[in-house]
Amino acid sequence: MRAVQLRAPASLDSLTPTDLPDPGAPGPGEVRVRLSASSLNFHDFAVVAGMIPTIDGRIPMSDGAGTVEAVGEGVSAYKVGDLVLSLFFPDWDDGAAPPLHALTNVPGDSSDGYARELVVRPQHWFTRAPAGYSAAEAATLTCAGLTAWRALFVDGATQPGSTVLVQGSGGVSVFALQFAKAAGARVIATSSSDAKLERLKALGADALINYKEEPAWGAKAFELTDGRGVDTVVEIGGAGTLDQSMVATRVGGHVALIGVLAGIVGPVQTALLMSKNLRVQGLTVGSRAQQLAMIAGVEANGIKPIIDRHFPLESLADAFRHQASNAHFGKIVVDI
């Protein structure tokens, strides 16, 4: 089968297209899946860029969607021909937070991922894909879609009349905008690009802030809520933007800390955190139960992902270079 492996030392230039043996027939409780698509996330970039250490020869990519080719003895969840979608944490079935052992099994990181044509894995490593979705569309959901869903509806309580602030126009932020609007929320979107802000407006954003023109964008967002503050901030920047997010948030509000794009360490205004009674909660993707709930949600609302560009598997390094350029809007898909 065709695959891409990450050679040591890890870098975009060390992503190596290769041919690997066919994984064979599924055993008891396993499914054989012919993968058709993956999609890029910052987590995947961190692995291939060497920020998250892994072994020589690792097959990267946490997201994967494809068709079941064969099922092993005892498999009841799927049949041949089903379109299935990978899980970021295959061993996290349900619950408010992942069990410790689940954190050590992430495809594309601590085990081989989905930059390949074929995989044989236990049936619980997958869920069904949304009805009417292509494999490319389904592959955008595993990490980015579920992260946005959890931020708004599992850890947060987004509902009609809520106000949500999203940062930028990457996969998580665009999904959060789409999900929030489907729930009847008001959305404030930030970006450094007026062109991207116009695209966010076309997707339903109610208010726009160019953070290069408004460095104190937290105060601007607070002002746009008539001095109440936003209910939830989908925080992708980390230490570099957290203070502004807290300024933007209402008393008793929620900052969903899902990224570190603007820094991994830095001072935090603890007095502001305390005086506003804020909840700043870190999150890493979600569980199987949450993924199934998200799938039901996108089906009920007819939500489709925004795909920026497609790259062939052999051009995975070019796909990451496009991601690193920050020119994309929405998700970058790899066709397998």
Image (cartoon, helix red, strand yellow):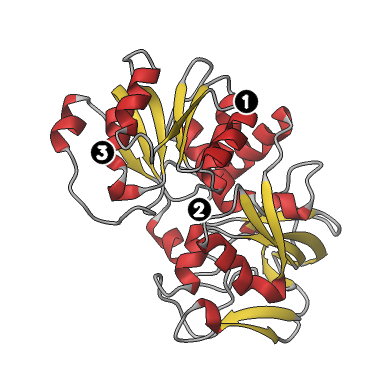
- Compared to residue 99, the image places residue 151 above or below, namely above
Q: Which residue is mark 2?
A: 92
In this orientation, does residue 95 appear?
yes
Q: Residue at x 55, y 52 (%)?
A: 143
- Compared to residue 303, the image places residue 103 above or below, namely below
- Compared to residue 319, the image places residue 263 above or below, namely above
Dot 2: what SS?
A: loop
Q: Which residue is mark 3?
A: 243
Whether residue 26 sits left or right of residue 101 in the image: it is right
Q: Residue at x 53, y 21 (%)?
A: 185
Amino acid type of the residue tagged 1 in the rendering: Ala
Q: Residue at x 67, y 61 (%)?
A: 38
Residue 100 at x, y percent in the picture: 38, 58
Amino acid type of the residue tagged 3 in the rendering: Asp
Q: Kindly report the distance in space between the C-alpha atoms of the residues bearing marks 2 and 1.
A: 27 Å
Q: Which residue is mark 1?
A: 182
Task: Kindly give the residue lying farthest to the right in the view shown.
Answer: 81
* Label 1 vs 3, first from the N-terminus: 1
Give the quadrant of the C terminus.
Answer: bottom right
Whether residue 147 sits left or right of residue 258 in the image: it is right
In this orientation, does residue 73 appear?
no
Mark 3: few, some, or many residues within 10 Å (few <14, many ≥20)?
some
